[in-house]
Image (cartoon, helix red, strand yellow):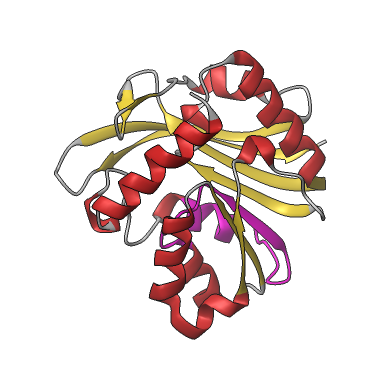
């Protein structure tokens, strides 16, 4: 799918649906927050939420006292929704309206977070490009958490096909530049009551 087509697709999703209606909605992103807490990430860490859209992770990070939060999303509408929800707190966040595959970081990040964006990349060259950008964007010793649909999870999301990953497959993708620290699988219940099976892997930049 061309970049302009991807952008139009996601703009339509965010224009026609409230965030509480989309399949990936989580009022409290427990897996992501547990990763942040268990990793003992300092409040001054530079955090990048890839495909963060108008998710609630940024709200929780602000409440926890993190001061260098960056949210990247392809959809301008998603970012505007998040800004409106946060009100004055939106000024405490760096918002990046970009396709992750076109992202040219101006700084290094200590934490890279991606829940349910990476699995939309189907072309092996796009996957390779994503890994390269992550490697160039994360500081040495920095941490990364990637969440995708598992090999037992859905094959489509929001009208688009996705790539499913087992724990072994997801860990192997990032092996050239990152050391796996943990992998596990868990269920997510959508607002409509559907059970979706996810694979999560955490890594350290080497």
Residue 88 higher or lower than 167, as above or below? below
| Residue 160 in magenta stretch | no
Residue 35 higher or lower than 95, as above or below? above
Task: Report the residue at 41% width, 63% height from top.
Answer: 56
| Residue nearest the observer in this picture, 184 or 91 | 91
Task: Report the residue at 61% width, 24% height from top.
Answer: 171
- The part of the image, by quadrant, that contains residue 20 is bottom left
Residue 81: x and y in percent read 39, 65
Task: Report the residue at 62% width, 40% height from top.
Answer: 100
| Residue nearest the observer in this picture, 44 or 34 | 44
Q: Quadrant of the C terminus?
A: top right
Q: Is residue 175 left or right of residue 188?
A: right
- The part of the image, by quadrant, that contains residue 45 is bottom right
| Residue 153 in view in this figure | no
Q: Is residue 42 left or right of residue 199?
A: right
Furthest toward the left, the residue is 193
Q: How many marks?
A: 0
| Residue nearest the observer in this picture, 104 or 201 | 104
Residue 67: x and y in percent read 66, 74
Residue 50: x and y in percent read 57, 47
Q: Is residue 91 left or right of residue 9?
A: right
Task: Report the residue at 47% width, 50% height from top.
Answer: 75
Q: Is residue 206 left or right of residue 50?
A: right
| Residue 108 in view in this figure | yes
Residue 112: x and y in percent read 65, 48
| Residue 40 in magenta stretch | yes
Numbered range of the magenta stretch: 32-57
């Amino acid at each position: 799918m061309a970049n302009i087509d991807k952008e139009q697709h996601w703009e339509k999703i965010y224009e026609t649906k409230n965030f509480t209606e989309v399949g990936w909605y989580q009022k409290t992103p427990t897996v992501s927050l547990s990763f942040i807490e268990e990793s003992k990430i300092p409040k001054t860490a530079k955090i990048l939420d890839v495909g963060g859209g108008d998710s609630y992770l940024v709200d929780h990070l602000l409440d926890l006292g993190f001061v260098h939060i960056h949210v990247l999303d392809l959809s301008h509408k998603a970012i505007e929704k998040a800004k409106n929800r946060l009100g004055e707190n939106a000024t405490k966040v760096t918002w990046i309206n970009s396709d992750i595959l076109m992202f040219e970081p101006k700084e290094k990040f200590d934490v890279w977070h991606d829940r349910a964006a990476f699995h939309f990349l189907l072309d092996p060259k796009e996957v390779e490009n994503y890994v390269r950008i992550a490697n160039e964007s994360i500081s040495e010793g920095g941490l990364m958490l990637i969440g995708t649909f598992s090999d037992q999870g859905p094959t489509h999301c929001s009208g688009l096909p996705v790539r499913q990953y087992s724990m072994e497959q997801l860990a192997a993708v990032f092996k050239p530049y990152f050391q796996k620290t943990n992998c596990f699988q868990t269920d997510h219940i959508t607002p409509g009551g559907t059970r979706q099976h996810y694979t999560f892997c955490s890594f350290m930049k080497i």
